[in-house]
Image (cartoon, grey):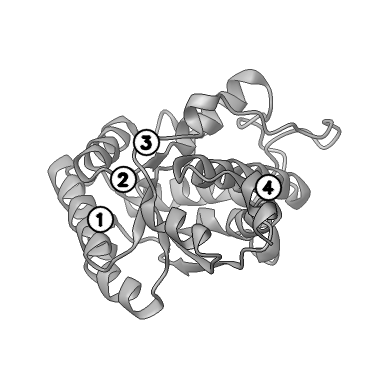
Amino acid sequence: MRAGWTSVLLLLAGLTASAFARADDPPRSCDVPAYLLTSDRPLTRVASAVKAGGPLDILVVGSRSSTIPGAEGDAYPARLQAALREKLPGITVNVSVELEPRKTAEDIAPGLGKLALAKKPTLVVWQTGTVDAIRSVDDDTFHDAIDHGVTALQNAGTDVVLMNMQYSPRTETMVSPTSYIDNMRVVAQQHDVPLFDRFAIMNHWNESGEFDLFSPVRGADLAKRVHNCLGRALSTFVIDTAHINPAELGTRR
């Protein structure tokens, strides 16, 4: 069983360090349906920080799929930072990453409150669910871990965005993500926090032909392209969910 988990982890991690499309594919548009890029659950602290002129400090708590080994500046957290700096003129934006590889939500949740108090971010993006799905963690255990983690982050005074797992047609026969995705959605509703549906966004890209997520072809340049699209999508999600109008920022200076 441990060997099976390792195989799936390596396959999912390969989505970040391998090709998502053929090398001769044209540049991608990163199109995402509008309903996947906003939420009716507000990011009040993000809105207040931007209104005050910054800084906007974001902490991504994630796994190996938050990185591109050897090219961290091209991974989605760095692309998120670049996109927000471009879209929010005059606002200092800093995105940092706390990697928790091969850990379940239950492993991570107890330390989230202390982490937020130490780093004092405006927003924490908690990316989780993959390891839990691979290990078939009990649904109630997973739900309670997400619930405790979000509670700790909110008590520490930060906005929270939950981000679910990657979509991979190559792992569908080995991993069933549905209950974990559903539990994250339930906890997000219970705590009135937004959920960035990475799974649905990547599924859309695969079905629309934006990226071929089934392709086994390897290539760092293509991984960078996908991460760039994720960073751009997440920047739009943060801005729209916080109800920020970037056009108004330039008029204040």
Amino acid on which the number 4 mark rests in the picture: Asn
Q: Give the residue drawn at x 25%, y 60%.
A: 154
In this view, 35 is above or below 67: above
Q: Residue furthest front?
A: 252
- Check contact, mark 2 vs mark 4: CB within 8 A: no
SS at badge 2: loop
Picture coordinates of residue 58 (x, y %)? 48, 63
Q: Which residue is mark 1?
A: 150
In the rendering, which numbered label is found on residue 228?
4
Q: Give the residue drawn at x 44%, y 36%.
A: 197
Q: Nearer the viewer, mark 2 or mark 1?
A: 2
Would residue 156 appear left or right of 241 to someone viewing this image?
left
Would residue 158 appear left or right of 87 to someone viewing this image?
left
Q: Which residue is mark 2?
A: 193
Q: Nearer the viewer, mark 4 or mark 3?
A: 4
- Check contact, mark 4 vs mark 3: CB within 8 A: no
Amino acid on which the number 3 mark rests in the picture: Val
First-in-chain label (3 vs 1): 1
Q: Between marks 3 and 1, how big is the CA–CA gap?
A: 25 Å
First-in-chain label (2 vs 4): 2
Q: Residues within 10 Å of mark 3 (few under 14, many from 20)?
A: some
SS at badge 4: helix
Residue nearer the viewer, 51 or 235? 51
Q: Which residue is mark 3?
A: 175
First-in-chain label (1 vs 4): 1
Q: Between marks 1 and 4, how big is the CA–CA gap?
A: 27 Å
Q: Nearer the viewer, mark 3 or mark 2?
A: 2
Q: Give the residue drawn at x 46%, y 48%.
A: 7
